[in-house]
Amino acid sequence: MADLAPDPAEEKLLAAEPGGRPDDRIDDERHDEENRLKPEYVRSVTTALDEDDTDRAYDLVEPLHPADIADLLELLDRDDRRALAAAITDLLSSEVIAELNDYVREDMIETLDAGAVAGIAEQLETDDAVQMIEDLDDADQQAVLAELDAEDRAAIESALAYPEETAGRLMSRDFVAVPEHLTVGDVIDYLRQREATTDFWEIFVVDAAHHPVGTCELSWILTTPRTIALTDVMKRDQTLVPAAMDQEEVALMFQKYGLISAAVIDENGRLVGQMTVDDVVHIISEEAGEDTLLLSGAGEGDINEPIRDAYSSRVRWLIANLGTAVIASAIIAFFGAAIEQLVALAVLMPVVASVGGNAGTQTMAVTVRAIAMNQLTRSNTGRMLVREMRVALLNGVTIAVLVGLATGVIFTPMLGGVIALAMVINVITAGLAGVAVPVMFERLDQDPAVASSVFVTMITDSMGFFAFLGLAVAAGLAG
Amino acid sequence: MADLAPDPAEEKLLAAEPGGRPDDRIDDERHDEENRLKPEYVRSVTTALDEDDTDRAYDLVEPLHPADIADLLELLDRDDRRALAAAITDLLSSEVIAELNDYVREDMIETLDAGAVAGIAEQLETDDAVQMIEDLDDADQQAVLAELDAEDRAAIESALAYPEETAGRLMSRDFVAVPEHLTVGDVIDYLRQREATTDFWEIFVVDAAHHPVGTCELSWILTTPRTIALTDVMKRDQTLVPAAMDQEEVALMFQKYGLISAAVIDENGRLVGQMTVDDVVHIISEEAGEDTLLLSGAGEGDINEPIRDAYSSRVRWLIANLGTAVIASAIIAFFGAAIEQLVALAVLMPVVASVGGNAGTQTMAVTVRAIAMNQLTRSNTGRMLVREMRVALLNGVTIAVLVGLATGVIFTPMLGGVIALAMVINVITAGLAGVAVPVMFERLDQDPAVASSVFVTMITDSMGFFAFLGLAVAAGLAG
């Protein structure tokens, strides 16, 4: 929808400027060595806003790259953010809007009327426009759509018809497709007379029914004689993305096959859009980072998420954790008489549970990551389990020796033997649970990162208390 | 080093084949719906290998994409893997080697002599060749380098001179750079007569001193009249990557600015290589997924990591965890008399510690992720802390009410009050520690994902036991 090709006239002006050294954007006065905006710079902007000096705020922000303007808006609190947005309206380009964190964008969009939102949407590429309005409530969404011109509205509505986080929702509808009978020269001539819209890296070759038959990188076109047939240059072995494919699958495909772009096809195999790697990069980062948050029960875990949402997603896991802690408590209560006789049991029992829990979390993290990367399938689950059992045995024995000796010296040798054996049992149980729980969720078609933690912790806590207290009673130490 | 451009003669043969429908690689007889190799297919290969039927194994593997051959090798156990490698030597292309998991590749390389490794290295692009030999021990590395021809050896040695995981080590030395005085037409003519080496997406424009002054996407060249000066088309606002930059920073830069490729410069600002997004995609996935593993203390956490390495990286965190569990035990021991009087304290104390630990892990995961994504800086840490305190208060009160009521009914109202108050204190402590510990590590220039877990758990365990047992004694329930 937007024209992202460089404007030669504008570029010429830039070129005429003296001292046109490249701006490398690192280690300048605004960025620290990790390319983050310096706190002093951010403070100078907020000071200007606090003093209502919007001209100064504008001058400070004007040299920033759009991605940095987006970062700056995210770093500010809500009041300053709105004040800044009001001060730099003409710097709020489509690139800034596209780079903004979802929650921050939503918060800013809420203050605008439908006409203004539609105005921004028209500047954006379809996929970015969709991202902007997909989270609005139905009434607001309809109001914005009504303000759009027919072509943009149709494109956005067709994207919204696909489920969230699928290729159909995320794909770009701007791509270059050419018929298969052309020569390289024909393609070059076609591209020259075609109106430039967005950047592209590959062109898609289609047959008469608009089915993709091959892809051709621009570098191949530029390095092949004009007279060669396109079908002799193109790569026939394509990776096609069905429009209904989940973004996680798309991301794995791009990684696996090292793709720059891929054709998106509808259920009839017709080319309807493309996914490009610059969009997929965000998905890869999101999907890979998501597991860290899901495993901890932190939900979306975005620092810009409204407090209400953060509370409701986290508290449910804390309540689940409470439920599993009650099971562990019941086991302790069952051995209440033993603890009354030998209070050392109460002192030592959390050690067994804690180390077991940590061992379980280690194995679980490895398993969840391997599942997410498609590295763990039915073909190698058995081998993985054997491997983890061997690591668990080594870990369990090491820890058992340390704990057993210390307990033997401080308390009694018998108690040292009991805690050592309980530790070995619990660390091996942890290894087993750390593989089995996520694999079980995966086979039930559930995301293994979501609920594995609660179950693994329940198993290691319960087994830790049970093995230690049970062995103590069996050994005649108490009870 | 390798010629990756399509061979027109070979493509022509393909084009002449009847029924050249695109291969979409999904839902075929070898892949499941998530694009993983089906267990039945893998089993058919291992069966062929077990029966020493190498021809059948070859025929089964031959239609696979190189990335799938790499996946297949990873799925097999060591014996089958070596048998398969021996059966399909001519299918083991540079692409397969480049796609292999580091540990699997290392394991396979170890069986080869220096000459064979050098033969493979010469087929690979420099960055992939470097990756293959960087983990060999010094003697083996020297032996392989000695077998290489002078040019390849020089390229690899110059890469190895940079530290691991920096742009200089990872960059490609194959790129297209042109002087700034050319027109678009000159560039096209130059590209046509230039020997095709690797694929490229952008060309770099350099001045007489080989300093990059701009970049130009191929699509801009293809859609601009031949007579226009290159300097009028190129983008001057470049993102330059210093060769010493860490791969994590490179990955964040590619994400932030939506880059396809970026020029790598040496300390004198001269263009020495390029990073392309297809390589960066692997880094993004690795870096984003790494935190899940580091937070759990699972080290590299690769399912192909040798057991010895997995043991040594994990056991050290279990020992650290043991150390912190001892602190918690000491606190319990301090209240030993109270527990002897009222065994309900021993039954309930793990609940306070467990929920607090979970709440701390949630906040810590959010904080670590935000730091990794450069979203949390000195500018907004205060705001983030206030936000987390508010979430913690809501969570703490919710859980306290549930636990307090249940304890009040099952035990005594006074004990219910004590556990409720202890829970609020511990969940708020958890929120504070979950932000403060990773931020503190970050400010000390340590990776916050590595050791935060141990400290946060120590704080929530200790505070859980101390608050609960201490309040119980203060309330006169025991002790």
Image (tube, coloured by chain):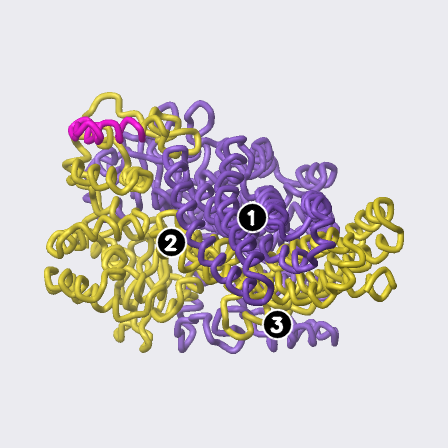
Chain colours: A purple, B yellow
Q: Is residue A187 visible?
A: no
Please tell me whether mark 2 or mark 3 is closer to you in this view. Answer: 3
- Relative horizontal placement of residue A14, taking residue B90 as reference (left or right): right
Q: Quadrant of the N terminus of chain B?
A: bottom left
For label 2, count other residues whose C-alpha is less than 10 Å away and answer few (under 14), some (14-19) or many (20+).
Answer: many
Query: Any magenta on residue B251?
Result: no
Residue type at mark 2 is: Val
Query: Which residue is disc 2 drawn over?
Result: B277
Q: Secondary structure at mark 2?
A: helix
Query: Residue A241: in sight, yes or no?
Result: yes
List the residue tagged with mark 3. Answer: B378
User: Of the residues under marks 2 and 3, which one precedes in the sequence?
Assistant: 2
Determine the residue positioned at 61% across, 72% down: B378
* Residue B52 among those drawn in magenta: yes
Q: Position of residue A388 (x, y in %)?
A: 42, 46
**Which of the two residues, B37 or B208, is positioned nearer the viewer here?**
B37
- SS of the residue at dot 1? loop
Image position, residue A5 (x, y; %)? 44, 53
